[in-house]
Amino acid sequence: MIIVRLIMQTVILALAQIWTNKVRAVLAMLLIAVGAGSLVLVTGGFEGFKKNILKEFSSVGANKVWVFPRRPPEARDRFSWRQIRMNVKEADGMLAKCPSLERLTPVLEFTADAQFGDRRRPVVKVQGIRPIWHEIEQRFVTAGRPFSEIDLEAVRNVCMVNDKAIEELGLPGGGPGNYILVGGRRFLIVGVVETKSVSPMFGQNDAQSEVYIPFNTAMAMKPDWGIFVVAQTRRPELFEDAKAEITFYMRKIRNLKADDPNTFGVEAIEQYIAQIKRITTMIQVFAGGLTMVALIVGGIAIMVIMLVSVTERTREIGLRKAVGAKPGTILMQFLVEAVVLCLVGAAVGLAFGYSVVLGLKMIPNSPLPESAVPTWAAMLALVFCAGVGVIFGMLPAMKAARLDPIDALRHE
Amino acid sequence: MTIRLSSIQKIYKVGVERVHALRGVDLSISKGEFVAIMGSSGSGKSTLMNILGCLDRPSKGEYVLNGKPVAKMGAAALAEVRNQEIGFVFQSFELLPRSTALQNVMLPLIYSPKRWMGARKRARGALDRVGLGERVKHRPNQLSGGQRQRVAIARALVNEPSILLADEPTGNLDSKTSEEIIALFKQLHADGQTIVIVTHEEDIAGHAERIVRLKDGRVMSDRKTTEDPIHREYLDRMAVAAADMAKHDAVSAASNGAPLAVAPEVRGHGEAKVTVATTAAPQPVGAKTGNTGGAA
């Protein structure tokens, strides 16, 4: 109770002092406000940027995992391509041994020339897939039909194309029913794969022609080609488990000894998301840190006005000491005054920063629609401003506390 | 015994020189006394007042205030003693200009946590005591000099100090207001308040019951006011001066054609031969005759 009342009294006293020196206090507070405001503004704007990037990554599919052959970087020459390339047996056994995986498909990817009539595209991406691929990639068939098990079993020469391929090859009637030549083979188009709008950061959009053929047909065309596996975890956060399971399974099936390096790679999109989160947060904190320089400048301004204030109020300090204020009490009084100055400045700055960030969000076609001031930044601004008040208020407060009451009362 | 100073010395270092401001002062003041401390500048009276008020510590010697040895206390402990035991009244009032009378009076209570309860009521009581019960909301610039000093006295009294320590309390006041403030001191003294006044004015000191005179850092004399030879001499001198004044007025009055009358108490203090030159042209007399009446 008594402590609360003392603090209240000191705060009210400090506010009254600030009020009596309005212009000076407002100028110093402005510097603090600029610092605090830019802190929340920079971090808030960056939060929007971060969310945008993460959204683009998530659009690829947050729970996707790739398994692919890779020469161990530390022993590149020890393993031949034959040893490291993946085969269908490895891919097929994986789902049963890795409980974190929901579904997977082996993919055989190569480029070939595609031709329809006299129209020829020299380098077209051709992917051999299984029907489950549509589920994993979340890209479905918009016209015609997907591959059936019969297409795979019978190694049929059927294919699907994307909209870009229809456009580039000039296929009539939307695609299905036409025959095209892929790598010299004649394929019947059975379906059209939807074009999914994903980030331009990732190639899979409508930028290039794509041809999909049954996985078995692709294997028949390129029997020595390497394959990779695209899998989906049951939940995005299982990516670490999935990676561990796949690694264990692959090492076992390849009979790798304990000190052998991995002859394959496992990557999860979630892992990149986590990494990007880390990096962007780091940049955000760093940029926020830079704005604290402004706060320090504000702190110096606070110190200067407090020093002037102490000199001006020397007689008052002398009187207060004469009637019984202890050095510690005077110290507290001036410290509280500095801290109150800083916190009022911080509040003004936060209000300003919040409103600008809100504006960033509200403007039509905002580049940063997800901008939001992170709570930690606001708290940091307040705590840091209070800290600036304490640190830069300390020198003037100590000067006041050390004044000799006799000299102070004699001061003109 | 409220105050006991024994062989107090105070030595200041000015550059490499050592200045003896006090060279062994012994002084005791009992509860309820009204003491004036006098001395010319350089006599050490300011230093003595600072030590009495616990604003400063003696270089040597013992000071027991209300049973507490305060000579060796630290700054914080001395602050507490000042808060609890001493009420200061300064020549230039030292009121906080932007605070009301009540807030000014409450100032010592802020630093006295055990008195926070009912601080406002206590401050009002102190203002009532000095006759400013109606002026609690006024700021110093809305008060006259005498009223300001009353607020300062209320502030000094609010914590019920052992000593009221006044440093030239009438130095910034006109003589009529000074008399009012002195009357207030006498009233407080009659109520049992211990009062120490530091002054260089004999007529102010004359209201105290005891005068301590300092010279060159030592107590030169310490007597009851009525037995103090310097003060008696001063009173005589004042009486002569008053007589001279009266005579002068009488002369100017007479020269203006007023009837000559000398008051009986002036007559006893010596004789003056009054020669009136009647050659001066008669002038309007209204103001002068009025003055004569006042002096006589």
Image (cartoon, helix red, strand yellow):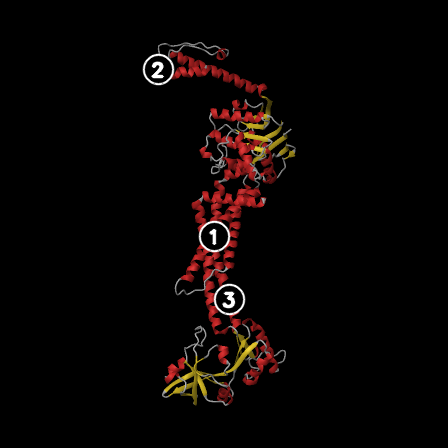
Q: Residues within 10 Å of mark 3 (few under 14, many from 20)?
A: few
- In the image, residue B230 lies at what x, y percent? 55, 20
Can you tell which mark lies on residue A347? 1
> Disc 2 is attached to a residue of which chain?
B
Q: CA distance from mark 3 to mark 1?
A: 29 Å
Label 2 sits on what residue type? Pro
Give the number of the mark in front: 3 or 1: 1
Quick check: B181 left or right of B67? left
> Disc 3 is attached to a residue of which chain?
A
**Residue ID at (53%, 19%):** B234
Q: Secondary structure at mark 1?
A: helix
- In the image, residue B96 lies at what x, y percent? 49, 37
| Residue situated in front as seen by the camera: A349 or A80 | A349
Q: Which residue lies under the disc numbered 2? A: B284
Is any atom of residue A91 visible in this view?
Answer: yes
- In the image, residue A100 lies at what x, y percent? 58, 75
Q: Residues within 10 Å of mark 1 (few under 14, many from 20)?
A: many
Q: Which residue lies under the disc numbered 3? A: A279
Q: Secondary structure at mark 2?
A: loop
Q: Secondary structure at mark 3?
A: helix
| Residue situated in front as seen by the camera: B215 or B273 | B273
